[in-house]
Image (cartoon, grey):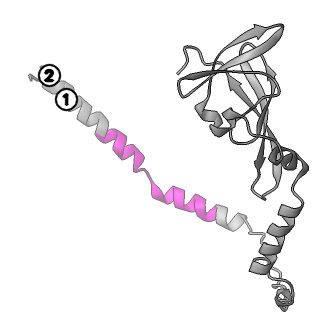
């Protein structure tokens, strides 16, 4: 790599400019110090004194007299009560006969098309390389999924699942048409 040919007077000029710039930054510190001293004398701090801390009054723990929330007897009682009185949405689902597509999880199903038979829309579902026809009112998936509506592009259904508190809730779900299939 070759260096560009620069004249010696140009490099000396750049050194002179650089040294002048650095000496300009290091100017008179006395003037700055006197200004700072004047400002300190003029400004009076206005600080409010801190209020004394409030006295802490400890309270005795009274939770020991109550029922322990995680006692095995309490949990067993709650489970027995739930089995005797299941949620009405779940009770109806437990008493009916399961349909074949309820053996498969919903994410293993693919909607590959739709057809109309005698004016009723049917969806075509592909599950494990088999093709199934489903309509509104049929059940699919492992969460009591009941088909509510079938259109050309999707299947609307409601599932019954347990939330974090163990309560049974209805959850709307959609299975959409997959272009080209899996």
Give the labeled residue for mark 1: 11
For label 2, count other residues whose C-alpha is less than 10 Å away and answer few (under 14), some (14-19) or many (20+): few
Q: For residue 146, what is the image quadrant?
A: top right
Residue 113 x %, y %: 65, 14
Secondary structure found at label 1: helix
The residue segment tinted magenta is 19-38
Going by the image, does 61 lie left or right of 37? right
Give the labeled residue for mark 2: 7
Residue positioned 70% across, 13% down in the render: 114
Rendered position, 7 above or below 60:
above
Closest to the observer, 71 or 121: 121
Q: Are marks 1 and 2 in contact (CB under 8 Å)?
A: yes
Residue positioned 87% across, 56% down in the render: 86
Rendered position, 95 above or below 40:
above
Closest to the observer, 173 or 8: 173
* Res. 18 in view: yes
In which quadrant of the rendered image does the N terminus lie? top left
- Classified by dominant secondary structure, the portion drawn in magenta counts as helix
* Res. 48 in view: no
Residue 180 x %, y %: 54, 14
Residue positioned 13% across, 26% down in the render: 8
Residue 133 numbered tag? none
Residue 22 x %, y %: 35, 44
Residue positioned 42% across, 50% down in the render: 27
Q: Is residue 78 magenta?
A: no
Secondary structure found at label 2: loop
């Amino acid at each position: 790599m070759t260096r560009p040919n620069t004249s010696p007077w140009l490099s000396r000029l750049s050194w002179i400019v650089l040294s002048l710039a650095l000496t300009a930054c290091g100017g008179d510190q006395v003037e700055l110090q006197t200004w700072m001293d004047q400002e300190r004398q003029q400004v009076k701090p206005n600080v409010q004194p801190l209020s004394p801390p409030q006295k802490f009054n400890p309270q005795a723990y009274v939770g020991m007299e109550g029922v322990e929330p995680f006692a095995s007897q309490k949990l067993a009682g709650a489970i027995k009560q739930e089995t005797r009185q299941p949620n009405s949405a779940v009770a109806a689902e437990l008493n009916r006969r399961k349909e074949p597509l309820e053996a498969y999880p919903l994410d293993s199903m693919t909607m590959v098309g739709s057809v109309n038979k005698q004016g009723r829309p049917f969806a075509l579902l592909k599950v494990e390389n088999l093709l199934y026809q489903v309509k509104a009112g049929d059940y699919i998936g492992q969460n009591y999924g009941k088909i509510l509506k079938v259109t050309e592009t999707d299947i609307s259904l409601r599932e019954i699942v347990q939330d974090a508190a163990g309560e049974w809730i209805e959850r709307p779900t959609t299975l959409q048409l997959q272009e080209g299939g899996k």
